[in-house]
Image: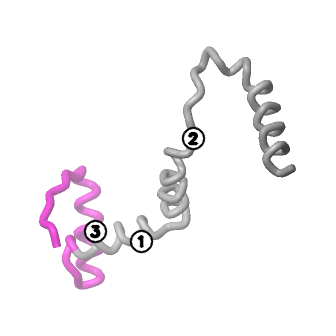
Amino acid sequence: MIRTQIQLEEAQFDLIRSEAAKKNISVARLVREALARYLKSPRQVALRNLATLRPAFKPIPMDDLSDHDRWFAEAIMDSKRRSD
């Protein structure tokens, strides 16, 4: 494990400490378990999967957005040519 520090608001720490005491576990363990659940949540998994696609797409400059329809049509035509 890697040791780290975090800063919490007093109210957050009080709640975490209370919850850990109820479960008879350390604050550190409670934080690790909560973080593990968060990272495994469907939304976070989907966001990480989407992030892997980012290099496949080129950003379009804002001033070029007016050409979007033309680019879309060209992409469809290119796709049809390749499939023929």
Q: Secondary structure at mark 1?
A: helix
Question: For mark 3, does the 10 Å Cα neighbourhood hold few (<14), some (14 to 19), or many (20 or more) residues?
Answer: few
At label 3, the amino acid type is Val
Q: Quadrant of residue 37?
A: bottom left
Report the Cα–Cα distance between label 1 and label 2. 30 Å
Sequence-first tag of 3 and 1:
3
In the rendered structure, which amino acid carries the disc numbered 2? Phe
- Of labels 1 and 2, earlier in sequence is 1
In front: 14, or 51?
51
Give the structural element (helix, strand or loop) at label 3: helix
Which residue is under mark 2? 57
The residue wearing badge 1 is 37
Residue 74 as seen in the image, left or right of residue 13:
right
Q: Nearer the viewer, mark 3 or mark 1?
A: 1
Which residue type carries mark 1? Answer: Arg
Residue 80 is labelled as none
Q: Residue at x 73, y 26 (%)?
A: 68
Residue 79 point in image, percent of width and height: 79, 44
Query: Which residue is the site of mark 3?
Result: 31
